[in-house]
Amino acid sequence: MSTDLIAIAVAEIKELAVIEPKQASKRFEIIANTMSDEQLGEVIEQIDIVTLTQMNSQHDLSFPSIISELMTPEKIRDIVCQQPLYWEEKIKNNAEELKQHTFDFLTYLIRTQDNEEKQAEILECIAEDPAGLFYLSIPFIEIYRGEILEYENYWEDKLYEDEEHLEEAESFTERQLAEDAHNIGYDDPKSLLALIRQLTPGVESAIKALIRNERSGWEGIISKFATELVMQAKEKNQVEDEFAEVDDMFSFLD
């Protein structure tokens, strides 16, 4: 009976997602009231990554989501890497919009988790994928690179003072105390970066190294990273489609 309910829920959500992903997300929230976390986890596992990406992208990012809480770090990584294919043109072609959008989406996926262990697992899992590291870096490019200022005969790298504030925040044992003391709210990228530094220093180092390896201004870096993300997402989809075709060829053996 439980298996039948899961299959029905998966079919209903997939059908709704084809018409309106936001309605599919709302339907999942309603179904969540009638199933255990284990059953909901099974539902999520049976929903394809494209549908999950659309549902999470259409969710109101200012509110927590049951689906984001129950997804595995691997699912979240795949969604992050897939999401650039669904960026609107106004986001994709505007550095400020893209910085804000990626920050909001990462905050939604990471901050909604109920424990720091899973938050750390998600961050490490995303960073292990080259596309995921590009995505993780976008909200912090302006912090680490600032502007490249042209003087008479040379270029000078101007770094913002935000890093000093983050170093101060790290001196406190409780992250929340640090954020309150320095008036860093959850809506500030410095807050998410402070969380990454505390939970996964290696991920923060990888982000910093990736960004500081670039020599253009922050807007140019964002544009380059965005292009790379879209290209890698398309390549992954192409590979997955090829595997699906092979599976279909041999489906008669099942």
Image (cartoon, helix red, strand yellow):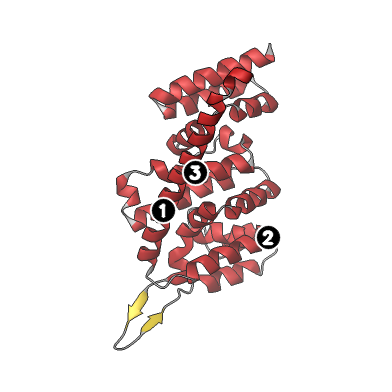
Q: Quadrant of the C terminus?
A: top right
Task: State the separation of the CA atoms marked 1 and 2.
Answer: 26 Å
Q: Residues within 10 Å of mark 3 (few under 14, many from 20)?
A: some
Q: CA distance from mark 2 to mark 3?
A: 40 Å
Q: Which numbered dot is residue 236?
A: 3
Residue beneath the point at 50% across and 40% down: 239
Which residue appears farthest toward the bottom when viewing the image? 153
Q: Position of residue 124 (x, y in %)?
A: 63, 53
What amino acid is labelled 1 in the image? Gln
For the N terminus, give its image quadrant.
Answer: top right
Q: Earlier in the sequence, mark 2 or mark 3?
A: 2
Q: Amino acid at mark 3?
A: Lys
Looking at the rendered image, the disc whose residue lies closer to the viewer, 1 or 3, is: 3
Compared to 100, does 52 lie above or below? above
Q: For the point 50% across and 35% down, which residue is it?
A: 242
- SS for dot 2: loop
> For mark 2, what is the residue?
174
**Residue 100: image tag:** 1
Q: Earlier in the sequence, mark 1 or mark 2?
A: 1
